[in-house]
Image (spheres, helix red, strand yellow):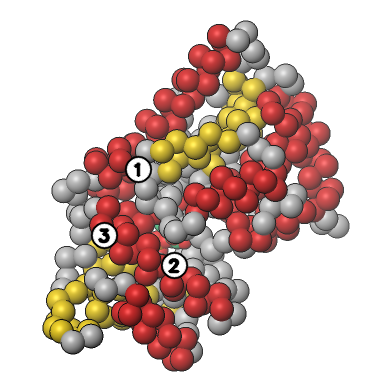
Amino acid sequence: DWNSGNVIAEQVERIRAQVGDARVISALSGGVDSAVSTALVHEAIGDQLTAVFVDHGLLRQGEREQVEKDYVESTGVRLITVDAADTFIGHLEGVSDPEQKRKIIGREFIRTFEKVQRDLVDEARAIGGAPIKFLVQGTLYPDVVESGGGTGTANIKSHHNVGGLPDDLDFELIEPLRALFKDEVRAIGRELGIPDAIVGRQPFPGPGLGIRIIGEVTAERLDVLRRSDAIVRDELTAAGLDSEIWQCPVVLLADVRSVGVQGDGRTYGHPIVLRPVSSEDAMTADWTRVPYDVLARISNRITNEVHEVNRVVVDITSKPPGTIEWE
Ligand code: XMP
């Protein structure tokens, strides 16, 4: 019978046998899967592991701090954060096409990660340390099935491009979650002491807020979206809706403006779209019937606190035909 303690003990032993005294790196995305797989590997081999977190500037409010502080405190993982926001946003300048954005973000992620990797390999060599031979990947059982039961190379769905690494890397993969489902991964994460705010996270796409701004991505627009998104998450959590809602993308229609009246004046601001969905596996989804009073609070708060936004609308499309994300 299934028990998270047993799975941890089994994996710890297996990882130790696989790794020996080599060194390992892991890409942390802030999501549940990479957080738990990294913590599990750390449990097995301690400081032979280095975790790398790329801040691409497309994160939500508080996410970086959560990884740098709460995650590190609870796990003791040795973490390197790469501040790459300017690079990513620079490369996204003038780009509105969704596929183009995804490609650029994915490419820059790989570039950034490879650079850190090279630095770490050089560093290991310089101090005569053990070579870095392994890469941790948070692949779950449903990912394995979806990608045709792939073998030992990085096989992430093509649209999962951030965190999905190129397959010409000279690394062996460690995938301690390959036999597990999401709820089992969460149970293991809790057992390992990872804070609930991370383990209980709803899915968030690798390209982050970059695909939730319809139109060009700029630092100012990211700021507007980030503040709006924080209010939405805050109110949905306060209303106790986190388990009912699979995820709730918050989308900024940056190229759309409408007339409003805020305070004493006419405004010409942007709409924010709420996309709350209920789902089992994200393959299909229904829009969540969020209580009107909760929607009212969210709308009031956003239009009062984020002055660039003068309209809040709710997406009532199921999937299909609408995808969960707008891009
Ligand atoms: P769609 O929009 O295709 O999304 O209905 C289905 C699920 O996948 C997430 N998603 C992504 N996750 N990288 C990810 O890691 C991506 O590029 C990506 N695109 C979409 C989305 O949030 C939803 O949970």
Amino acid at the residue labelled 2: Ala
Mark 3 or mark 2: which comes first in sequence?
3
Whether label 2 touches label 1, CB < 8 Å: no
Q: Residues within 10 Å of mark 2 (few under 14, many from 20)?
A: some
Residue 273 located left or right of residue 264: right
Identify whether 176 is placed above or below 308: above
The residue singled out by tag 3 in the image is 221
Identify whether 196 is placed above or below 231: above
Quadrant in the rendering for residue 174: top right
Helix, strand, or loop for circle 3? helix
The residue singled out by tag 2 in the image is 230
**Disc ID at residue 85:** 1
Residue that appears at 42% across and 53% down:
59
Amino acid at the residue labelled 1: Ala
Residue that appears at 19% across and 74% down:
269
Helix, strand, or loop for circle 1? helix
Residue that appears at 64% across and 40% down:
38
Quadrant in the rendering for residue 276: bottom left
Quadrant where the image shows the N terminus = bottom right
